[in-house]
Image (cartoon, rainbow, N blue to C red):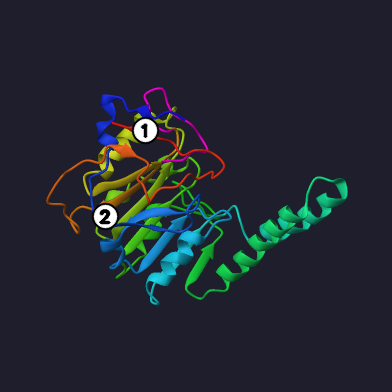
Amino acid sequence: MKSKILHKSLKYILPLKTNDLIRLGNKNDGGYIVSKRALKNVNFMISFGMSNNWSFEENFLKINSNNKIQIYDHTVGYKYFFLGFIKSIKRVFYFRSNLQNILKKFTELIGYHRVINNNRIQHLQIKVSPKNSYGENNLNRILSKIRNKKILLSIDIEGDEYKILDNINKHSKLIHLLIIEFHYLDKKRPLFKRILEKLKKDFDIIHIHGNNYTSFCKDGLPITLEMTFRNKKLYPLSKKNLVKKFPVKELDYPNLKTQNDLNFYY
């Protein structure tokens, strides 16, 4: 795929250059880029959205034996993975599955069992939403309960990120690192721009990566964009040099490994 040129109006999404970026998690989908300097101080991760990939969370625990994680994802649980495994076996009899798929589902089941039995991980099957209705919780309420923690907040909730970010700056003193996967940028651009303007008051953009499960908008911006932010007051940058070419070699890899990564530049 040819590189796309970002429209000149998109300068506001460009990250500031920092030399301490590392990758946590898988090389493909499920891995994210963080600041090593900030990561040394972080001791608590809050993760909105887990699905069937927890490599990022497990890598985080390896950084420090005192690190802990709280995961919010109402879409998955032991029942979900167990039924997925059973269905993969049943589908063999209808020639709709194979040994490779059964092994994949079994690996997911065993992996989830390992996660929920780790005493440093708490998985809450609760939806994160703007409301506080039964079975749901909101960002403000979750962060208001946190005391004496230095937080890495990760958000990948398939488009619902736009609904929950209004009050995030209120808790900026707690958040050292922030990772958000923004979806539907071909349709949600005005809302995305408004949220980004607010976030940039307290956070520097230090990395972006286009998710190749989707393609590009007409102006060159990936439809799905992974973004890493770092608290600008806790980790000020003396130089404000911009990164203008993506993906970043030796850090970024295609989310969907069977396709080329999204290449774009400013």
The reply to whether the magenta stretch includes residue 55 is no
Name the residue that disc number 2 marks. 172
Which residue is at 49% across, 56% downward? 26
* Residue type, mark 1 in image: Phe
Name the residue that disc number 1 marks. 264
Q: Residues within 10 Å of mark 2 (few under 14, many from 20)?
A: many
Q: Main secondary structure of the magenta part?
A: loop
The reply to whether the magenta stretch includes residue 219 is yes
Which residue is at 41% across, 53% downward? 32
Picture coordinates of residue 137, whole percent (x, y):
47, 54
Magenta-drawn segment: 210-222
Marks 1 and 2 sit apart, C-alpha to C-alpha, by 30 Å
Question: Which residue occupies the foreground of this view, 179 or 96?
Answer: 96
Picture coordinates of residue 209, whole percent (x, y):
39, 42
Q: Residues within 10 Å of mark 1 (few under 14, many from 20)?
A: many
Picture coordinates of residue 258, whole percent (x, y):
57, 42
**Residue 119 located left or right of residue 42:** right
Mark seen at residue 113:
none
